[in-house]
Image (cartoon, rainbow, N blue to C red):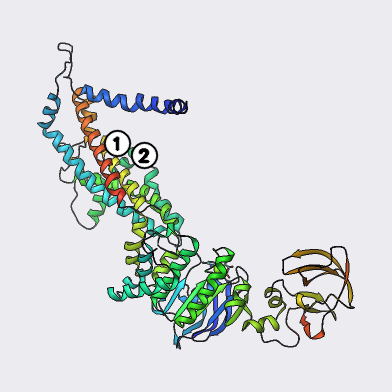
Amino acid sequence: MRHVIGWLLLTPAAILLIAFTYWPIGATVADSLFSRGNPIRPSRFIGLENYALMADDPIFWQVLWNNALFALGTIPASIALALMMALMVNRALPGRALARMAFFTPTILPMIAVANIWLFFYTPDIGLIDQIAGLIGLPGHNWLGDPDTVLGAIIVMTVWKEAGFFMIFYLAALQTIPPELWEAARLEGAARWTYFRRILFPLLMPTTLFVLINAILNSFKLVDHLFILTKGGPDNASNLLLYYIFETAFSFFDTTYAATLTVVLLLVLAVLSLVQYVVLDKRIHYR
Amino acid sequence: MSAIAVEGLVKRWDGHAAVDGVSFTVPDNSLTVLLGPSGCGKSTILRLIAGLETASAGQVTIGGRDVTGLDPAKRGVSMVFQSYALFPHLTVAENILFGLKVRRVAKADRARRLETAARMVGLDGLLDRKPASLSGGQRQRVALARTIVAEQPVCLMDEPLSNLDAKLRAEMRDEIRRLQRALGLTMVYVTHDQTEAMTMADAVVLLNAGRIEQQGPPPMLYERPATAFAARFIGQPPMNLLRGPTPGTLTGVRPEDVMLNGDGRPARVEALDYLGAETLLRLSLDGEEIIARAPGRGAPQPGETVRVAWPAEAEHLFEDTGIRRDGGEP
Ligand SMILES: Nc1ncnc2c1ncn2[C@@H]1O[C@H](COP(=O)(O)OP(=O)(O)O)[C@@H](O)[C@H]1O
Ligand SMILES: [Mg+2]
């Protein structure tokens, strides 16, 4: 009887999860095993042919590489910046509330709005960056038009947007750490850096794990800005996996290949979360 | 050698003086208690001695050396916080050794000091635990061990026992006193509990609103309170203060000096506090409340009238400003 009630209580959540998560995942995996259908030749089962196609697709490897660079460029930088900003505004300084708000503002803006602001920064010649560069006599540069700089430009913008959000979590965690810990360490002769390394940073580890998971997921999920800034270009230099999936599905209407790419994205995310929970969890102190 | 001298110490926050011209000395190898109600500036004085706050005015010397502007780590003090300030992610041993590692004490030396300290406070067998799995009393012992291994000549304690239950508090009181003597520490101990102060202190500095009301050894504070505040604050139950004998004066009488037998002024028994060994009688004497001590059993019952009197030499006379009339040392 007890477990009947248990299952009944579980049902609403289970229905929602199945309808909106597991069913679509299953359908996507199934789709990826079929050929692209058209009015003349209907879709048919082709096994792993789509995956073989993908392995030979240079754009797929490029967006995967871009995504790796994007993740490496944004994750450590935004977390480090977030921690630095949180340490800064956690102190009793005049104008602290103002600084906190300033750091947090990029977070409350939608990505599309952020992209528009940065479009104004990056525009060649008349953009803010080139204007400032012009003042000190540097030549203008087409930041978003140059395959060598476009990914970097997008990374900088993403760090700017993400750091403020992560700062809030660090700030909340810092407020739970009693100030006597620093005073006790200080009386023992610990420098600020020693205190940070031996006490503060380990105590912030649960927050860092949480932020890290979010940052990694975001590095695969955040593509809104590509619609405004680059559309993945030039020459796929700023294309990311999710944007490539979108293009494949809705610009090239190749839904089965899009399904194949989606399966890869799901696998990447699943492996990453597994690694994080299994490996990092063991080494983290939870109070 | 490590005597502390505090001279004209002032600490102001936004114009309000939390510590307002405080001077006292703590002789080498002795225990001085800073006593006073909550908010009177005890912690602030302790933190000024430690260097965790900077003084607005005045001077702190330790062992004859002016340390007023010196870095806290260089003053030769260790401190026990009310919250113990243990590092939650480190084991007991790591907590105790943190300071020694920071100060780069050699490994063999660290192990030796850890062992001695753990034995002194009874922490053997708990060294691999995290603070979260310890009881309040055990955490307190870790905090004590941390100050022992530091081997600093001066030890500062801020209400170290206030998070413990009454029985443990009495035990730890003895233990801290024993450690202080055994290690020859110069100790400043902050508390709002006059029992702690009276039982532990070589000397008490009684504070009120950032100023010293009176300082001296416990018997002096009890027997010759310099102010009405000191009279009321020290002693449990507090001293009775009655108007008179002349206008603008107050007469203080300790409850144990109030005699119930024989002749005297009539007083009505309003209520009883039965404590076992004794009973406290709350009497109404000409409209003023007065407390008397009576034996545990056979005390008069509420509603009865008794006659109260006290010997003239038990009277303490105060101006209504609170100052003792016959000139107690402030
Ligand atoms: N950091 C601070 N900023 C402003 N006021 C403070 C600060 N610390 C203490 N005070 C004030 O100083 C007074 C004395 O505080 P404290 O020394 O903690 O008292 P005690 O330890 O005797 O309870 C209190 O009125 C308190 O509000
Ligand atoms: Mg205090």
Which quadrant of the figure contains the C terminus of chain B?
bottom right
Dividing the image into four quarters, tell me where ligand 2 lies.
bottom right
The crowding category of the residue bearing disc 2, from other C-alpha atoms within 10 Å (few below 14, some 14 to 19, many at least 20), is few
What label does residue A110 carry, if any? 2
Query: Sequence order check: which comes first, mark 2 or mark 1?
Result: 2
The crowding category of the residue bearing disc 1, from other C-alpha atoms within 10 Å (few below 14, some 14 to 19, many at least 20), is some
Whether disc 1's CB lies below 8 Å from ligand 1 is answered: no
Seen at 74% across and 75% down, the residue is B239
Location of residue B195 (image quadrant): bottom right
Given the image, on which type of amino acid does mark 1 rest? Asp
Q: Secondary structure at mark 2?
A: loop
For label 1, the residue is A224
* Residue A142 visible, this orientation: no
Chain to which mark 2 belongs: A
Q: Residue B154: x and y, percent?
A: 45, 80
Chain to which mark 1 belongs: A
Seen at 38% across and 42% down, the residue is A109
Q: Residue B299: x and y, percent?
A: 81, 68
**Is the Cβ of the residue at disc 2 closer than 8 Å to that at disc 1?**
yes
